Amino acid sequence: METAVPIIELVGLGKEFKTASGPIKALEDINLSIEQGEIFGIIGLSGAGKSTLVRCINYLEVPTSGKVLFEGRSLSAMTGRQQRMARQSMGMIFQQFNLLAQRNVIQNICFPLEIAGTAKKDAKKRAMELLELVGLQDRAKAYPAQLSGGQKQRVAIARALATNPKILLCDEATSALDPNTTKSILNLLKEINKDLGVTVVVITHEMSVIEAICDRVAIIDQSHIAEVGSVSRIFSEPKSKIGRQLILGDAAEQVVGFGNSKRVRISFDGRSSFEPVLANMILACKVPVNIIHAETRDIKGTAMGQMVIQLPEDEIDANRILNYLKTAKVPHEEVKDYDF
Amino acid sequence: MIFDASTIDMLKTGILETLFMTFTSSLFSYLIGIPLGIILIVTDKDGIRPLPLIHKILGLIINLLRSVPFIILLIMVLPITKRIVGTTLGAKAVIPPLVFAAAPYVARVVESSFKEVDAGVIEAAKSMGASTFEIVWKVLLPEAKPSLLIGAALSITTILGYSAMSGFVGGGGLGDIAIKYGYYRYETEMMFVTVAILVIIVQIIQEAGMKLAKINDKRIN
């Protein structure tokens, strides 16, 4: 995987929109590479630029600076026709599903095949296969208006996969769905990635989506990439302010206002979560600590945890704990109020 | 007033002339109006292929034509009418001015139907690599079909209304009869009868359009 050409590479990408009140930079200096076969997440608050970013990948939005490389070929160097051909290798699904309301399920799935010039008979056969893949064989003749949100998204997924794309772009694909449906759609995406080897790019504002299926994640904030890394790394040690905010959520705010003594964040990676780190520490140091925030998450089968503790006011006691953490090689860092 | 055989014959001819004028003009108006509507929507600044200059010029021409009152237009285009149909009298002669008046109207009606098509669906088609032509042919037209049918009922009834004015230039049809009898001869009964027939025709066209739209709309089932 490391030796292969990344399926998507964004180099110094920027996008500026001209508005009545002057230009607005939606994206600035974005550098990312998405590897073949991975599930890559892009998370950010609304207005961070993530939707624009995903549209730059298939040139629905043409970037104003920088390059998009699809399998090493620059999209800007392609003719309009070549760009449309490249898009046939990139499926896309949307928050609002965007199915053709006047076509039934099977006709919707056949739509990209019609554009690709596939013979009608072959298209229909392929559409039926896909319908089976997404578990909707019995709804072939239904119209979108007769389907639930989850079913619509399944049809949209089948449609996006019709032309055998190498990559599937998902723009807030589960944001309009309830939690259970979200889960089943995410599982479907995971299966597609595993069984068909399709690279998946997921745009979301929900950490739970990233946590559920992504291998790597990029956090985007105010038009820039704040940090990129494996999901387990970012969840255990978010480096950026926005990363902490997204992962700790409201807990980050609760910490504020707890007196002035030092606060330390302890990260539990897979190994240490099986040891009673905190209990051992308290026994060894004979010093009480105040637990301000704690959580564990299951990421790809390993427990990942976060804990923010408040150290005693007494500096000697506090240092004793810091030394213990250091010698026990527990990943930790000091947290300052303003840092949240 | 007596409704003898000749009166009934006259009304029959009137109905046929009116229907002929209305449907022939509607057909030509749509043949011109649909492409114009497509150009308007495609070249819009948020359209599939924004071309602001073309959009502005076309919009201006359409607005100009639409601001001329039909009765004036009828007279203004007489030379063109003569060249196209060879006469300036009768039902045939009313068709060119009707098309001149209705095509820009139809273009706007068609444009507004296309505007109702979900932008997300067009974006999805683009993401599949559809060309501008494919988006127009496979997305805009079929997705806007119910709305286009409702628009057609509106346009046809409007054209029917315009055609009634043709009486002033000897154009024939029910409007002509109404004006001749009601306005020049003070035979108000005859005027009411023709108006009643016009009302019924409008009603039928409107209902048929709505019904067709409903049958063709897969969003409500």
Image (spheres, coloured by chain):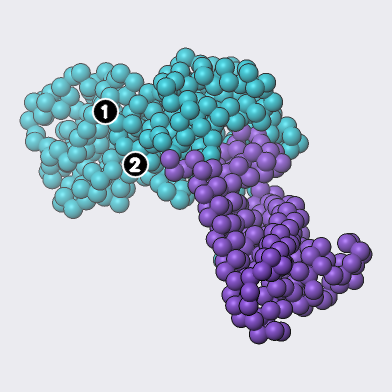
Colour purple maps to chain: B
User: Mark 2 packing: few (<14 Cα in 10 Å), some, or many (20+)?
Assistant: many
* Left or right: where A123 falls relative to A42: right
Q: Is residue A280 visible?
A: yes
Q: Earlier in the sequence, mark 2 or mark 1?
A: 2
| Residue A328 rendering spot, x and y as whole percentages | 23, 23
| Circle 2: residue type | Leu
Q: Residue at x 71, y 59 (%)?
A: B16
Q: Residue B68's x, y, as percent?
A: 74, 75
Chain bearing tag 1 is: A
Q: Is residue A200 visible?
A: no
Q: Nearer the viewer, residue B119 or A204?
A: B119
Q: Amino acid at mark 1?
A: Arg
* Corner quadrant of residue B63: bottom right
Question: Which chain is rendered cyan in the image?
Answer: A
> Cα distance, mark 2 to mark 1?
14 Å
